[in-house]
Amino acid sequence: MRGVGRLTALALALACSGCSGRVAQEAFRSAKPAGRAPRIRPDYAGTVLPPNIAPTNFAVEEPGTRYVVRVEAGQSALDIVSRGPKVIIPIGGWRRLLAANRGQELRFTVYARAQHGSWSRYEPIANRIADEPIDRCLVYRQIDPAYNYWKDIAIRERDLESYHDRVLLPSKLISTGCINCHSAPPGRPDALTIGLRSQEHGAGTVLLMGGRARKLSTKFGYTAWHPSRRIIMFSDNEVRQFFHTARPEVRDVLDVSSDLAYVDLAARVVKTQPAFSRPDQLETYPTWSPDGKWLYYSSAPCPPRDPGVFPPPDYATSRYSLMRISYDLASDAWGKPETVLSADKTGRSLLLARVSPNGRFVLFCACDYGCFPIYQPSSDLWLMDLTTRAYRRLSISSPRSESWHSWSSNSRWIAFSSKRRDGLFTRTYISYVDPEGRVSKPFILPQRDPTAYDSLLKTYSVPELMPASVPTTPRQLAMAVRAPTPEKLRDERPKPAAAQSAGPPADVPWRQAR
Amino acid sequence: MAKRRNRAQSDLQSATTNEAQASLAPEQRTSSGYSSTARLVLFFLAFGLWLWLRVDPHLVYEGHKHFPPFQTGWPFLQGFLDWPGGPVAYLAAFLSQLYWWSWAGALLLAAVAAAITVAADAIARAWGGERARVLAYGPVLVLLIPLNQHFADLKTLLGTAIAAGLAAGWMALRLQSAGARAALGLVLAVVIYYLLGGPFLLWAVLVALFELARARRVLSGLVVLLAMEAVPYLVGMVALALTAKDAFLWGLPGHPDTEPSGGYWIVVLGGVMALLGPAAAGAAHLLRRSHPRTAAPASPWRAALGTAGLVAVAAAIALTTYDGVATTTLRVTKLAEARRWEAVLREARHVPGDKVNLVIAQHTNRALFETGRLPWDMFRYPQSPASLLVDESIGKEAKLQALLMSRRNDMFFAMGDLDLRLGLVNEAEQEAHEALTVHGPHPEALRRLALVNIVKKQPEAAQVFLNALTHDLVWGTWARGALRRLAVDPGWDADPEVKRIRSVMLTADGVGLLGNPFEQRCLALLEANPTNRMAFEYLMAYYLLSRQLGGFAAQLPKMRRLNYRGIPRSYEEAILIYEAESGKRADRSGRTISSEALQDFTGFLSAASAAGVAGPQAASRALAPRFGNTYLFYYTFGASGVGER
C-alpha cells in the first residue's frame, strides 16, 4: 500500500516536472525580447554573492500569468517555473550551481507569459559569485522600532546557507526584559556576551563561555572581546533618549556620560584606565585590532553641562573622533591614546569602528553628530586603509542610516544594518569587500519568501557575522538570566564610575511593556 | 478497597446512564430532552440578543485596548506555535475578528457560553445524574458578569470552554482499564496543556476530582493530579524554559498577558466549574432523599417555569452588573474614531458628571472643537485640568511615573489621533509605535503609522504598514485600496485629511523629552502656523482649565488671525475674571464683551457673595443651576457641566 503511494507521488512529481519543463521549453522557444532587464524585488542585480549564500529568491515586478526564470553560471543552469511572480529557487540546485562556478558570473533570465499567451524574455540580470565564502551564521537582534516601550525582543541566529533562523534568547523567557549588545570573540562563536536590562532580573551581562552560561552583575554596554578571550572591553554609558518634533527620524540618543572599562576574566576583576575614562571625555564603542595590540574607540569632549537641561542646547555639536590606544596583554599595560581620525578634520562624528580580521581596514560610521548612528539618517559607512591611513565614504552608503556593521572572519564580507528601503526599518545588507577595499553593491539578506520584508514590522539590529553556530540554547541563556544571584566581579574602578554600574536596574529610557 | 471501588463505579453507572432514565418512559425522556434543548436555545438566544444590543461586541473591537489583533499568514501563526496556550490564543485572535460585526461577536460569545453550559450540563449529569442538571446554568450566570463589563480576553473564555468540554468528554469515556485511563490522561494532559496553556489546569482539576471522588479510579486520578503539576513544570519550565508564571498561569487571570478587568469573575467561573461536580452529586443526593426514584418527570409547565426563573435570574444579573459607563466610554471612542462628533456630544451629554472619565472628557472636547464649539460650550460639560488629556508631564516620583505611563499605555490611540490633528506628527508617530509595541499589529496603529508616513512623505515606510494591514481580516481590503492609491499618488496630495495635517504640522525641528509641556507644544505649533485653530483653542482651553489667566490673556491677540465672530463665551468670562483680578486690561483684539456676558458676570458676583456666607459648598449648590455651565463657576468651584441644560 505504501509502495503504491510512493509510486503515485513519484508519478505526480514527474508529471509536474515534465509539465514545468514543457512550459520552460515553450518560453525559451517562443519568447520575444523585451529589450530591457526586468524589475525584481529585492534588488539582486549587479551584486557579488557569496558562494555559500541561501538562494536569493525574488519577486518579478512585471505583468504576467506565468514566469520562467533561468539561473545560470558557467555551464550550469537551473530553470524555475512559477505561476506567480515569486521566484523560489530550489536550494539544492542553487548550492551546486554556486559551488561549481565560484568567480563566475551568475545570470537570472526572466521570461513572462502575457495574458494572451505570448512570452517575453527580459535581458539577463547579472551578478557575480565570489570565490570566498561568507561566515555561515548571522546573530542579530529582532525588535520593534522601539521608542519608550519594548515587548518582544529576541537575539536570533540566521544560517546564511539556508533560511534556518533560530531564537537564541527571546525576551518572553525572561519576563520581557531588554536584551541587547550581543558580542562574540572574533572568529570564535563559542563565547558570547549579551547585555541584560530587566525589572525582574536586574541589569547585568550574560556570559557564555566554555559551554557554561552565567550572569554577571556588571552591565556591559558596547562590548569587544580581546582575541585572547581573556579580556572583555566594554563601555559604561548613561544613555538618554529624546525626540525630534519635525525631522524624519523621531528618536535620538545622547550619552550623558560614557567611559570604557574592561574585565579580566582570569582575575575576575573589572578595571579601567584614566586614559579612557576621562571625566571630560565621552569614550565609547571599543573594538580590538585582530592582534589584540590596539584598542580602537570613539571619543568626544564632554563639556560641563547643566544636568537639569536635557537635551543640552549644544547636543548637535557633539562629535566623536576615532581613537586608539596600545595594549600589552602580558603586562596589562596601556599606552597613550592617539587620534586615528579626528572629528574636527572630517566634520563628522566617527563611531562604531570595526577592524577587518586581516588588520588592513577599519570600517566605521560617520554621521552629523552624536553617538547613535542608527538614529541618524546622515550616518554613512566609511573605510580607512590602516596601511596608508587613507579613508573614504563608501559609495554603497545610502541617504538613510547605515550602521552596526560586522566583518566576516575572512575579511571579504561585511554585513550591516541599513534603513535604505524605507527610512524606518533596519534590514541586514551584505557586501563583498575585495583585497583592495573596493566594496560591491550590497544585497539584502535573502529570505525564503521574497516579499517577507514588505510587511515585516520588526527590525534587524546589530548583525554579527560568525563562522559557526553559537553553541547554546534558549533554555541555557534564560536560566542564566534568571539566576537569582549574579556573579560578582571585583570592581577596581574609581568609586564614581563603579557606583554608576552598581545602581538599581536601569529601566530608562526604554520601558518594558507587559 | 476493591469492593468500595466497585460500588462507586456501580453508582456512577446508575448516575450517568440508568438512574434518571430508568424512571422515565421513552416518550418522557424525549420530551425531557426537547425541553432542555428548548431551554438552552431560548436562553442563549436571549443571552446573545443582550450581548448584541446592549453590550455591543463591536465596541470591544473598536475601543478595547486588550482586543487581540490577527493577521493571516505564516509569520503571524508562527508566533503562536512555540509556547503552551499559543494555539488557543491564535484561535481566539482569529475568532475575535467577528466582533467587528456586533451580531457575529454576540453569536460567538453566546456560542462559547452555550458550550460552557453544555459542558457543565454533562459534568453535572456525570456526577449527579438527571436530577443535578439544574446546576448546569450556574457557570454561565457567573460568566455573564465579565461579559457585561466588556471582558475581551476571548482566549481565556475559549480555554475555559475547551477545558470544560474536554473534561466532560473524559467523564463520558467508557474506557475501563485503569492503566489505559491513566496513560490516556497523561497524553491528554500534555496535548491539552500545549493547546490551552493555563486553562489546562481546569481540565486537570475537573478530571482528577471526577476520577478520585466520583469514579474512585485512584490511579488515573492521581496521574492526572500529578500531571497538573508535572506537565507545566516539565513541558513549560524544563523543556521550554518558561518562567513559573508563564508555565502555570498563561491564559489565566493574574498573568500579565490576561486582561486584568473581569479576571476576578473568571476565577470565580473556574471555581464554580470545579465545584460543579461535587455540588451536583450533593444536590442529586438531597433530591433523591426528598423525592422517591419514581417521581414523575417535570411537567411542561414546570419546565417552562424553571426556564422563566432562570431567565429572570440572568436578567437580574445582567441588569445589575451592566457597566453603562464602560459601554459609553467605548461607544464614545468608537464614534470619535468614526468622526461622528455630534453623536459623541449626544452620548457625552447623558453621562453623569461624576462618571465622566478622561476618555469621555477628551473625546468630548475634541468633538466640541471639531464642531466649532470648544470655546463656547466646553463648560457645559464636566471638565478638569486633565480633561484635554495632553498634560503628560511625567513626575519624578517612580510611583507617579508608573501610573502616568500606564495611563499613557491605555491612551496611545486617542493621544496619537489628537496629536496628529494638532500637527504634532512626530508625536503621533511615537504614540502609534508605542501602541504597536504594546498591543501588536492592531489595525488602528497600522493605519495611523501609514498615515503619518504618508504625511511625512515617506511612502516606502507607509507601504510596510499597509502591506502588514493587508493581512488583517477586517481592514485588508481597505489596505489594498490604499496601496493602489499610494502607487499612483505616493504623497496622497489630494487627500483632504493629509492636506489638513500637512497645513498645520511642525516644519522646524525641535527636540524634547517625552511629555514636553503641552503649552510649549501648542506655542511651537502656533509659531509655525498662527492659523492653527486647534492648537490655539486647545492652548486656551489648557490655560482656562488650569486657571492660568495670565497665560490666557497673553495669547488673546492671536485671535486676530482666526476670524472669530465676537469673543467666544468662555473667553469673555475669563477676560472679565482676569481683568477683575489683575486690574489689567486684556487685549481683546478689538472686540467687545457681549452684554450677556457682562450681565452674567455681575449676576454671578452678586449671587456668589450672597451665597458665600453659607460656605463654599452651599454656594456651589446654590449657584450651580444658573451658572453651573459657565467658566465663572468652574474658575470659582472647580466644576462644570452642572448647570441646567
Image (cartoon, coloured by chain):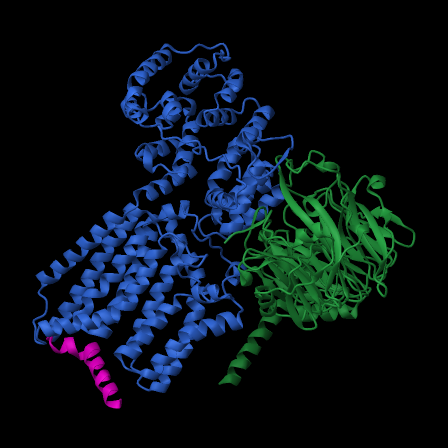
Q: In the rendered image, which quarter contains the N terminus of chain B?
A: bottom left
User: A465 or A105: nearer the eye?
Assistant: A465
Quarter of image, res A344: top right
Q: Is residue B6 magenta?
A: yes
Q: Is residue B372 left or right of residue B325?
A: right
Q: Is residue B30 magenta?
A: no
Q: Is residue A433 above or below residue A145?
A: below
User: B29 or B542: nearer the eye?
Assistant: B542
Quarter of image, res A22: bottom right
Residue range of the region highlighted in magenta in the rendering: B1-25
Q: Is residue B524 visible?
A: yes
Q: In the rendered image, which quarter contains the C terminus of chain B?
A: top left
Is the magenta region chiefly helix, strand or loop?
helix
Residue B510, x across and y down, in percent: 64, 33
Residue B148, x across and y down, in percent: 30, 50
Residue B448, x across and y down, in percent: 52, 42
Q: Is residue B481 visible?
A: no
Q: Is residue B261 left or right of residue B500?
A: left
Q: Residue at x 39, y 11 (%)?
A: B594
Q: Is residue A285 above or below residue A8?
A: above
User: B16 or A34: nearer the eye?
Assistant: B16
Q: Is residue B485 left or right of residue B302?
A: right
User: A388 or B513: nearer the eye?
Assistant: B513
Task: Count how many numbered circles sit on residues in the image.
Answer: 0
What is the residue that sits farthest to the bottom in this orientation?
B2
Colour of chain A in the image: green
What is the residue that sits farthest to the right in this orientation?
A388
Q: Is residue A317 above or below residue A366?
A: above
Quarter of image, res B302: bottom left
Colour of chain B in the image: blue
